[in-house]
Image (tube, rainbow, N blue to C red):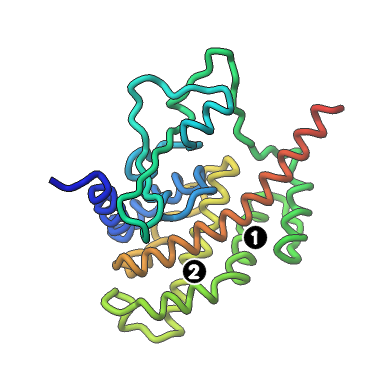
């Protein structure tokens, strides 16, 4: 009988493959990944596979430190500790699977319109000059482009080195770069919009992610997954810090 570790590895590989089957699967994953942006792509895959509606995951010790208990009988989300260290697993639990006898509430940060100006300045300082837009959605999509352009080259080199046996194999470097940049840019924007409280499906459709079907090996889907996860986390951490700072100022006044 396979060990729990082996089953988890197989689940991760299966879920990664399913992302490339069709754009709908990939977009569903992006929604879960956006809400769990502080986790690696590998962890996000397993969170998506086991609890796609998760919004904030942590280990029992972390929840206890925050004054919350994991609900009795709750099955944890199994994650791989490190793929280079076999047979190591850890478990996390979503906020929805916890309770607080003493009323310790966890308030996740939320992007509000009153924070837009401050967040805009933060993002401009962090990622480059952008024009002020009437709608914050446009600011986020512009930032997705800038962040992608600043960081895609290393991931592209990796993609080119692992494209054999994928549907990308027959494309030249220029075409692969175009496909990669477009998919990565749209992925980052979709996750930014989702975590900032927008319905990303109002701005993106399945055709915007059609090229994910070309990333049909574990190695290639890992490149787009890691790139999207890493870059989105950089942007969202800037937004989170600004929102929390603004919220603290409000409470003091």
Give residue 26's mark: none
User: In the image, is residue 9 above or below residue 148?
Assistant: above
Please give the name of the residue rendered at 45% of the width and 46% of the height, measured from the top-left corner: 31
Give residue 182's mark: 2
Residue 83: x %, y % from top left: 36, 58
Q: Which image quarter holds the N terminus?
A: top left
Q: Which image quarter holds the C terminus?
A: top right
Please give the name of the residue rendered at 31% of the width and 80% of the height, measured from the top-left corner: 169
Marks 1 and 2: in contact by CB < 8 Å? no
Q: Earlier in the sequence, mark 2 or mark 1?
A: 1
Give residue 143's mark: 1
Give 252 or 22, whichever is nearer the viewer: 252
Q: Which residue of the protein is positioned furthest toward the right in this rendering? A: 253
Q: Secondary structure at mark 1?
A: helix
Q: Secondary structure at mark 2?
A: helix
Please give the name of the residue rendered at 34% of the width and 77% of the height, measured from the top-left corner: 163
Residue 58: x %, y % from top left: 49, 37
Give 140 or 223, whichever is nearer the viewer: 223
Number of other residues with Cα within 10 Å of mark 1, as a class: few under 14, some 14 to 19, many 20 or more = many
Please give the name of the residue rendered at 43% of the width and 37% of the height, measured from the top-left corner: 92
């Amino acid at each position: 009988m396979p060990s729990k570790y082996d089953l988890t590895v197989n689940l991760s590989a299966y879920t990664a493959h399913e992302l490339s089957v069709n754009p709908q699967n990939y977009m569903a994953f992006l929604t879960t990944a956006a809400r769990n942006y502080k986790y690696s792509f590998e962890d996000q895959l397993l969170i998506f596979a086991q609890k796609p509606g998760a919004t904030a995951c942590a280990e029992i010790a972390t929840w206890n430190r925050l004054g919350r208990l994991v609900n009795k009988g709750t099955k944890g989300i199994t994650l791989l500790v490190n793929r280079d260290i076999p047979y190591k697993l850890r478990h996390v639990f979503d906020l929805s699977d916890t309770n607080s006898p003493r009323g310790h509430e966890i308030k996740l940060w939320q992007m509000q319109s009153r924070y837009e100006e401050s967040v805009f300045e933060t993002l401009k300082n962090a990622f480059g000059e952008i024009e002020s837009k009437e709608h914050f959605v446009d600011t986020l999509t512009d930032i997705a482009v800038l962040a992608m352009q600043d960081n895609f080259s290393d991931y592209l080199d990796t993609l080119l080195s692992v494209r054999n046996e994928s549907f990308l194999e027959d494309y030249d470097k220029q075409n692969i770069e175009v496909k990669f940049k477009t998919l990565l840019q749209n992925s980052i924007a979709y996750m930014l919009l989702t975590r900032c409280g927008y319905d990303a499906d109002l701005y993106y459709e399945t055709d915007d992610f059609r090229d994910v079907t070309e990333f049909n090996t574990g190695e290639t889907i890992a490149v787009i997954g890691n790139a999207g996860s890493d870059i989105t986390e950089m942007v969202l951490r800037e937004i989170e810090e600004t929102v929390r700072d603004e919220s603290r100022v409000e409470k003091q006044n």
